[in-house]
Amino acid sequence: MSQVAQLESDLRDRLAHTSLADEPFFLAARLSALGSAAANRVLTDLGLKVRSYSVLAFACGDPKPTQRELSQFLVLDPSQIVALVDELEALGAVERHPDPRDRRSKIIVATASGRRLHRKAKQLVDEQARESLHRLDDRQRAQFLELLHVVAID
Amino acid sequence: MSQVAQLESDLRDRLAHTSLADEPFFLAARLSALGSAAANRVLTDLGLKVRSYSVLAFACGDPKPTQRELSQFLVLDPSQIVALVDELEALGAVERHPDPRDRRSKIIVATASGRRLHRKAKQLVDEQARESLHRLDDRQRAQFLELLHVVAID
DNA sequence: TATTGTTATACTCTATAACTATA
DNA sequence: TATAGTTATAGAGTATAACAATA
């Protein structure tokens, strides 16, 4: 049914005083669940989800990733990348290019329209992220991102 | 196959300089995926997973949660709580008690052996968490937890 | 009428193994 | 022998609707 778990203040207070509230993996899972749901909601109109958006973002960056690298970046099995790339390819957003240095590999590169799509999507996602961090002031937000960066990118 | 995505330093460096590396939802998702996998690995021997461990933790806390509350805390559909509680009940770790204030609700409360199980599990999980945050010093870790707390607990 | 727990079901995601072509 | 991408498939997780008991 509904699963968006907007907590009333008394429930929030109870959650805040649980033993789990000090366990980073629980907090990260909760943040991830809430964040992904929100991001997916915002991306639907563009035909994207968090996963495909992430692949597209890498395909827009430099250097271009192979599928193997994508699977490591996104913590997904290589076999799952196939469907994601297929999906974006069907949208005309990315193409599979041969890797000149290893003919087994395929490099995923965004098309011009893929880059436009990414620009629009990033704007929506960034705005949504700003909202979900609204309880932090500028300094705290910067700090949080820096620490999260260190912790999440092994 | 393997999906534990231990990155080599050059790949880590590439990931660190991607546009996604500044998007909190992506970092949270990555941290959550890595953290849950690690926590699940550590909990297997006790017959628990992250989800069931989380339910057990609430059932050990005070005040005891209803299933409805659990679904909000864990950002899961109420129908999914049923199976989790069934699972813990089969382990003899929790019991469903009638809620004196609302006979529709069931309060989930840990048994004595459930509390022992939780104690053991928490020790393993905490140790694992400390490891995965090893790149932060004490002050940073405290800061990170505080900010994560604010952001994840709406 | 609305809500709690439950069941059922369809759908998505995840994990694993095997295949092919390259290395 | 090992690795990149692919396919197939089974299992786990997710979303949705409907029902009985209770509010």
Image: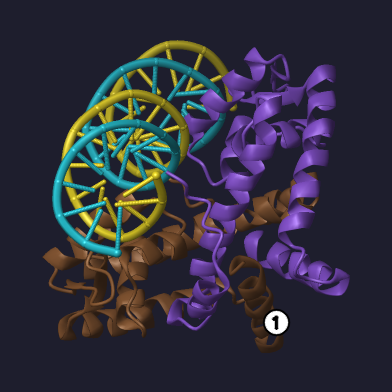
Chain colours: A brown, B purple, C cyan, D yellow
All told, the count of numbered labels is: 1
User: In terms of secondary structure, where does tag 1 sit?
Assistant: helix
Report which quarter residue B86 is drawn in. top right
Task: Identify which residue is drawn at 69% across, 38% down.
Answer: B42
At which x and y percent is residue A134?
A: 60, 77
Does A42 sit above or below residue C12?
below
Viewer-proximal residue among B55 and B4: B4
Q: Quadrant of the N terminus of chain B?
A: top left
Viewer-proximal residue among A1 and C3: A1
Q: Is residue A18 visible?
A: no
At which x and y percent is residue B32?
A: 57, 55
* Label 1: chain letter: A
At which x and y percent is residue B47?
A: 65, 24
Q: As drawn, is A15 to the left or to the right of D9? A: right
The residue to which callout 1 is attached is A143
Near mark 1 (Cα within 10 A), the count class, few <14, some 14-19 or many ≥20, is some
Q: As drawn, is B61 to the left or to the right of B50? A: right
Does A90 sit above or below residue A21?
below
Task: Identify which residue is drawn at 74% across, 31% down.
Answer: B59
At which x and y percent is residue B79?
A: 47, 30
Q: Amino acid at mark 1?
A: Gln
Q: Is residue B151 visible?
A: yes
Task: Identify which residue is drawn at 54% across, 30% down.
Answer: B81
Q: Quadrant of the C terminus of chain B?
A: bottom right
Report which quarter residue B105 is drawn in. top right
Does A89 sit above or below residue B117?
below
Viewer-proximal residue among B6 and B34: B6
Viewer-proximal residue among B28 and A72: A72
Does A7 sit above or below residue A47?
above
Q: As drawn, is C21 to the left or to the right of A7? A: left
